[in-house]
């Protein structure tokens, strides 16, 4: 079965077509084309189909037919979040509505002037979080810690539409990213990790998720448990009718206890999966033994 290699599928041409449709015919017209793209993925991407089917069938215990239909719905929902991100970046933010759950936590972090670590997952649409913060007048600089293996051509094209305000902190072998993280926190900035994608060969921690043991990247949980700053789980989840819901929950942190933080994180992720089962966007063999 497949393993995540740090890269996502897609082409610049595909993105350009969707941008054209969004600008000329609207977001829902782009959703219409998405039906055919999702159908292609559903019919021809065997490895990712098998992986996401396993999630629905074995981890969520869906009946076979429901699991199969959910594979298609998952692709379609994932495509919608990409279209929404492009539309918002292209200046159509006012077409969407926003709901804030736990915003008082973010206000308190800003007032405490300690910075904070955010941990999210490849669920929903976290990449539009910066637009949420501006909506509620939170003047935070977000730093995303990443391995940066995504297709550079797609990134360059999207940045030509709108330069993101999120800064990247690239993980390096010489560990220099640790200094960048500390510097950002000293400036009362947010440092964000995604905690759900372990890359083969890197250090990992294990914990049960949805009833089966899985591997998680050790870095986010080791770093977050040692920095003596607040840790917050943040998710931006898609709702019907161009509506988004931001969740922010402060995590319990014991100093230098990365495993306890991971256990808290998996419980948080499971809560989101229960509410939004179609927005789990890990199309690889997450529970590899």
Image: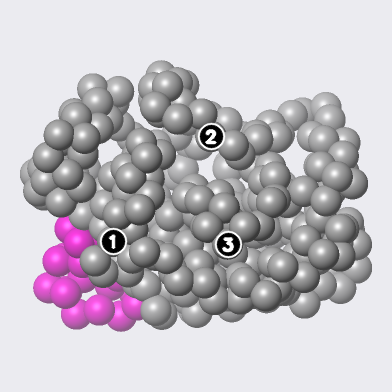
Q: Badge 1: how crowded within 10 Å, few (<14), some, or many (20+)?
A: some
Q: Residue at x 58, y 62 (%)?
A: 136
Residue closest to the eye, 97 or 197: 97
Residue 254 location, quadrant: bottom right
The kind of secondary structure element at disc 3 is loop
In the rendered structure, the answer to whether residue 287 lies left or right of residue 36 reads: right
Residue 107 visible: yes
Q: Residue at x 70, y 45 (%)?
A: 141
Task: State the residue position of label 3.
Answer: 136
Spatial CA span between label 1 and label 2: 21 Å
Count the labels in the image: 3
Q: Residue at x 53, y 57 (%)?
A: 135
Residue closest to the eye, 236 or 202: 236
Say which mark, if any, is on residue 164: 2
Residue closest to the eye, 187 or 283: 187
Task: State the residue position of label 1.
Answer: 242
Q: Return the disc, 1 or 3, that comes first in the chain's sequence.
A: 3
The location of residue 18, given as percent across then percent down, is: 21, 35
The location of residue 5, given as percent across then percent down, is: 48, 36
Which segment is the magenta one? 56-75
Spatial CA span between label 1 and label 3: 18 Å
Viewer-nearest of discs 1 and 3:
3
The location of residue 194, given as percent across then percent down, is: 60, 52
Tag 2 and tag 3, C-beta contact below 8 Å: no
Asked if residue 131 is positioned above or below residue 98 in the image, the reply reads: above
Q: Badge 3: how crowded within 10 Å, few (<14), some, or many (20+)?
A: few
Residue 18 visible: no
């Amino acid at each position: 079965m497949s393993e995540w290699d740090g890269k996502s599928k897609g082409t610049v041409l595909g993105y350009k077509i969707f941008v054209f449709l969004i600008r000329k015919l609207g977001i829902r017209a782009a959703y219409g084309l998405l039906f055919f793209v999702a159908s292609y993925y559903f019919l021809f991407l065997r490895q990712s189909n098998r992986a996401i089917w396993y999630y629905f069938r074995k981890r969520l215990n869906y009946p076979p037919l429901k699991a199969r239909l959910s594979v298609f719905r998952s692709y379609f929902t994932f495509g919608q979040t990409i279209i929404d991100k492009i539309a918002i970046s292209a200046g159509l933010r006012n077409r969407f509505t926003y709901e804030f759950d736990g915003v008082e936590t973010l206000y308190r972090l800003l007032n405490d002037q300690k910075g904070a670590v955010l941990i999210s997952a490849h669920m929903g649409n976290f990449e539009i979080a910066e637009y949420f913060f501006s909506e509620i007048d939170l003047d935070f600089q977000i730093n995303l810690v990443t391995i940066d293996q995504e297709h550079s051509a797609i990134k360059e094209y999207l940045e030509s539409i709108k330069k993101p305000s999120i800064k990247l902190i690239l993980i390096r072998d010489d560990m220099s990213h640790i200094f960048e993280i500390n510097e950002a926190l000293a400036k009362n900035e947010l440092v964000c990790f995604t905690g759900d994608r372990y890359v083969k060969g890197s250090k990992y921690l294990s914990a049960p998720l949805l009833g089966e043991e899985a591997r998680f990247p050790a870095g986010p949980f080791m770093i977050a448990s040692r920095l003596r700053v607040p840790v917050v789980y943040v998710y931006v989840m898609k709702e019907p009718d161009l509506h988004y819901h931001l969740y922010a929950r402060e995590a319990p942190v014991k100093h230098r206890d990365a495993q306890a933080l991971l256990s808290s994180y998996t419980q948080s992720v499971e809560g989101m999966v229960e509410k939004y089962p179609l927005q789990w966007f890990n199309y690889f063999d997450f529970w590899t033994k």
